Amino acid sequence: MKILKIQALKGPNIWSIRRPKLIQMRLDLEELEHSPTNMLPGFAERLKILIPSLISHRCSEGVEGGLYQRIEMGTWMGHVIEHIALEIQTLAGMETGFGRTRETKTSGVYNVVFSYIEEKAGIYAAEQAVLMSQALIDDIPYDIDACISELKKIRESVRLGPSTGSIVEEAISRNIPWIRLGNNSLVQLGYGKNQERFQATITGKTSNIAVDIACNKELTKKILHDAAIPVPYGYIVRDEEDVIPTAHNVGFPIVIKPLDGNHGRGSTINITDDENAIKAFHNAQKHGTKVIIEKYVTGYDFRILVINYKMVAAARRVPAHVVGDGFKTIADLIEQENKNPKRGFGHENVLTEITVDNHTLGLLESANLTLDSVPGQGEIVYLKNTANLSTGGTSIDVTDMIHPDNIIMAERVARVIGLDICGIDIIAENLTQPLTETGGSIIEVNAAPGFRMHLDPSEGLPRNVAAPVIDMLYPSGKPFTIPIIAVTGTNGKTTTTRILAHIAKQAGKRVGYTTSDGIYINNTMLSKGDTTGPMSAEFVLKDPTVDFAVLETARGGILRSGLGFSRCDIGVLTNIKEDHLGLSDIHNLRDLTKVKRVVLDSVKKEGWAVLNAMDEASIKLRNDLDCKIAVFCMDENHPVIQKRSKEGKVSCVYDEGNVTIKKGDWKIRIEKVTNIPVTMEGKADFMIENVLAASLAAYLYGFDIEDISMALRTFVPGANLTPGRLNIFNFKNFKVLIDFAHNPAGYKAIEGYLNKIEATKKIGIISGVGDRRDEDIRECGKIAGRMFDYIIVRNEHHLRGRTEEEINKLVIEGIQSSGRDVSYEIIPKEIEALKHAIGMAEEGTYITALSDVIENAIDLVQSYQQKEAIEERIM
């Protein structure tokens, strides 16, 4: 077997709209294509031994053990690999279960598709599933424990922490989109101007001053003390010589910890003598030069969590420990405790495995114990002196046991420090009585407190503490996204996108939009190139200044990574024509439709899909989408329009020279096409179609008719605004048209326009696109033969897998099949071809360059215009 390609889909895609995170592996089974699983001796038995948990995979049989039934009946290895990849992720603590395996048009080559939780882990699972399967086939050993261990390491290195993850999960449950910013825990919720950011449990609303205060333990204590809130007595020391005098001044037992520490790092508690005080000082200095020595308060360790200045949860924290049975050593008891199913690697389970480190050994030594000591029955041996869950501690929920006075005090602490999310550490005998009665103290106030102890306590009720965070960031009525209009189709996407963006700008929106020539925020291009993929969409949606997005969404990006957004308000499908067929498993219009409809399937249920009534492949979708439907059409009397009018449904039509909204029997005329510059005085039918699509989408969104009309009148096409989209350059005696048409449908659109143009001679500069089908290249040549009097055949900049000779041969065959005796010549370089055409232009000549490198062609033509203008001034 051979892996041909692995790609990670991150947004809605052709396999699933609701499960965006999928690995798609292109796998060549090679000789195994002729050997289904029932022809592989011993394979099923070895698989059962290696991964016994696969018995739970019901597969298409719908019963436990269904996968094994399929294997015994005979299935192909790609299907088995799909299930193995899913199961090893689950065994590594990343439970997931969606998968599909489909054969491609190439015999023996399959697309193996399965869901993932973490992208790197998903890719690793794909690779290992293939290696594992091959080992089972060859009856050679495979170390599955090492595989699972590596998957866990990958998971821990890339996953969001439990606190961050819980907030993201709560956002997802409310359909709030999210974007991970970088590789750490910085997350954006929502889109555009309505985004909110947080990292761990620090939000964009968290006061920087409050965080600084909380990180300065001495300042925190002073502020709380001045506010009559109980805190332990203590001092800051910097030098070893000050440790003993300060410790004696405070009075044993004491606590020594770094001034700016967190998560218990460098802290030592219940110090009772000078020797251990010095050791604790040096331990604390590893985490900060300034060290605080304070009175050790006896009691239990509690954490109260306050969010948005309201107490939401409380827990009692217990340091990592073991309980003796009179027989086992401490080392044995630790090993036994780590087998507790609640404990796991990193953050995979409720509890973290207990590790033995120098701190543990030192703690045991202070109690005259070693790892080989045997504690008595019921004897508790503490292995850490702080109660953090990350070091193996446990938590007990006590939220419902807190005295009202302590709740008031905790909420006041958060206000006094100024933290919107605040973890308050308290040492007290209990929280059922006021601290003023028990003698308890607040020993620390934490910015970015961990949530795990509340989400999954060892004992007691779990608390959804992520919910109040989302409530704070997005109170009732606050929007979390921005309007998104996504535009897809074969031809007309870019112009439709630009018209829509122009309409939105005219209506006062700050628009971010993506096109095949760049990303724009309002009128400023921020990134140049073909930006019609998911990363470009994400670029716009991450911009905090944008309040309206128009996203051109092309086939390539959908196939490569899925959509760059989760849902859109309006999806526009301009048309579906034969283009890019034979690439990426897209062989016919049905395959292409499956790709394009991903945009429409992402439309919100209350949103709109805008379809072209005259495009057969597009209009077929009207009864198969889970949103509202509207259509546009060049023919007011088209059967689809007539039927929809009788049903009172909305459409946009070309009506007696007008762009008209039609609903039932009434009409709203937006503008005459002769007043809309992009239609070339109504001569460019394909541009009128783009105007209809954009006008309908704008109307459905709710823009005023007057704003739409004004925008259409002021949208003036040209090389700067719409590069490569019917750009016309006027010379004294001839004209030059540059367009990006590159497929038969695009050529036909140009042909329709040129049929309305009077010219003494029409010269065409054309080329074939190397990665298109033979019949598509020939068809373009045939159309060119019909619409031009003279043709210059040039070569594309990128040949895409073919030779110049092969492409030119197909183009010429097409020209010769046009039924006209058209002269042609071959000039390989585009610029030279354009220069030659201009040089042979006579009065009344109309030159059309169908170009793949728009910028170079435009620059050359403009330089000729400037030269002509200078010559005229001299004369």
Image (cartoon, rainbow, N blue to C red):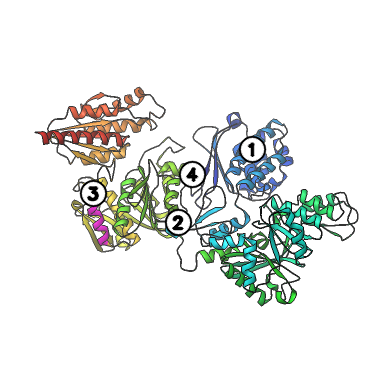
Q: Which mark is residue 310?
A: none
Nearer the observer: mark 1 or 3; the answer is 3
Residue 551 in the figure: left or right of residue 176: left
Q: Residues within 10 Å of mark 1 (few under 14, many from 20)?
A: many
**In the structure shown, which secondary structural element does the residue marked by tag 3 occupy?**
loop
Which of marks 3 and 2 precedes in the sequence? 2
Q: Would you say the residues marked 2 and 3 are in contact, meaning their CB atoms lie under 8 Å apart?
A: no
Nearer the observer: mark 1 or 2; the answer is 2
Give the x, y percent position of residue 345: 70, 49
Q: Label 1, label 3: how many angstroms apart (C-alpha)? A: 56 Å
Name the image quarter holding residue 740.
Answer: top left
Give 257 or 728, whichever is nearer the viewer.
257
Q: Label 4, label 1: how many angstroms apart (C-alpha)? A: 22 Å
Q: What secondary structure is the magenta-colored segment mainly?
A: helix
Q: Label 1, label 2: how many angstroms apart (C-alpha)? A: 37 Å
Q: Label 4, label 3: how many angstroms apart (C-alpha)? A: 34 Å
Which of marks 1 and 4 precedes in the sequence? 1
Nearer the observer: mark 4 or 3; the answer is 3
* Magenta residue span: 705-717
Can you identify the residue that label 2 sits on?
191
Marker count (numbered): 4
> What residue type is disc 1 on?
Gln
> What residue type is disc 3 on?
Val
> What residue type is disc 2 on?
Tyr
Which of marks 2 and 1 precedes in the sequence? 1
Can you identify the residue that label 3 sits on?
716
Give the x, y percent position of residue 209: 54, 62
Q: Would you say the residues marked 4 and 2 are in contact, meaning their CB atoms lie under 8 Å apart?
A: no
User: Where 284 falls versus 737 (above or below)?
Assistant: below
Can you identify the residue that label 4 sits on?
561
Can you identify the residue that label 1 sits on?
128
